[in-house]
Amino acid sequence: DQQVKQNSPSLSVQEGRISILNCDYTNSMFDYFLWYKKYPAEGPTFLISISSIKDKNEDGRFTVFLNKSAKHLSLHIVPSQPGDSAVYFCAASNFGNEKLTFGTGTRLTIIP
Amino acid sequence: DGGITQSPKYLFRKEGQNVTLSCEQNLNHDAMYWYRQDPGQGLRLIYYSQIVNDFQKGDIAEGYSVSREKKESFPLTVTSAQKNPTAFYLCASSYVTGSPDTQYFGPGTRLTVL
């Protein structure tokens, strides 16, 4: 039972344009969400997070949007750069629980 | 520099052998985690520990064992009972605050069973 889903296994975006990565979840108890970026043969690195009391969080070129009613979150990267080419995982948890549930990842390729 | 180290980076094992993957952190984190990544799949939790001398099974604990004798160390043993051990193994750590907190990952160990 996949509680966190990333339905697009891959995405290609022109350099300088906006990249939008999507994530859906089914567990209504989740109230904290994170995005990680992963290069091949390396560990994931934390990008940005959002709690359910907010619907938007920004950090530089990265913005995460949360739509609780739709159980959907998205990561926007503007402008996209070649170094953004990586696999992006969304993850979810709930307060009182340190465990994270990860999605299957989306491979983002930025085309120069 | 604070961080998480995993060794070795690549590991080869013959079928039927147990093998232990190392994970050390100097971030003073209370919690440590082991994940497995297979192609086309997300990270799946094997075991986690929130305090020394205590650990809990994750979603795919069968065929694995762990110990947590020191706060800094959380070794994972892949036993011969694990049917498909070839995978990329990731260790992570975080604070325990009662709220979800960011987990920080090591560089990973790729295990190949020959």
Image: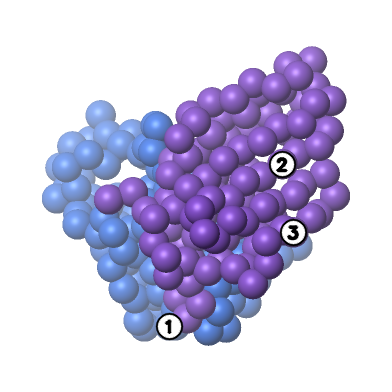
Chain colours: A purple, B blue
Asked if residue B12 shows in the view, the reply is: no
Which percent across, then down, holds residue B2?
71, 65
x, y (%) of residue A92?
50, 60
Chain where mark 1 sits: B
Residue A14 lies, with reference to residue A90, above or below; the image says above
The lab-note entry on whether marks 1 and 3 share a chain reads no
A44 horizontally vs A4: left or right: right
Q: Give the numbered dot on residue A64.
A: none
Circles 1 and 3: CB atoms closer than 8 Å: no
For numbered disc 3, what is the local secondary structure?
strand
Identify the amino acid type marked 2.
His
Q: Nearer the viewer, mark 1 or mark 2?
A: 2
**Residue B52: numbered disc:** 1
Which chain contains the residue that carries disc 3?
A
Work out whether residue B81 or residue B45 is closer to the camera in this orientation and state it. Answer: B45
Residue holding disc 2:
A76
Subunit that carries the residue with mark 2: A
10 Å neighbourhood of mark 3: few (<14), some, or many (≥20)?
Answer: some
Q: Earlier in the sequence, mark 3 or mark 2?
A: 3
Tag 3: residue type? Asn
**How far across and down, in percent of the image, does residue B27 sit?**
65, 71
Q: CA distance from mark 1 to mark 2?
A: 39 Å
- Identify the mark at residue A57; answer none if there is no mark: 3
Same chain shared by disc 1 and disc 2? no
Tell me the residue at 54%/60% (across/down): A68
Residue pictured at 62% horizontal, 46% vertical: A74
**Residue at 77 percent of width and 47 percent of height:** A62
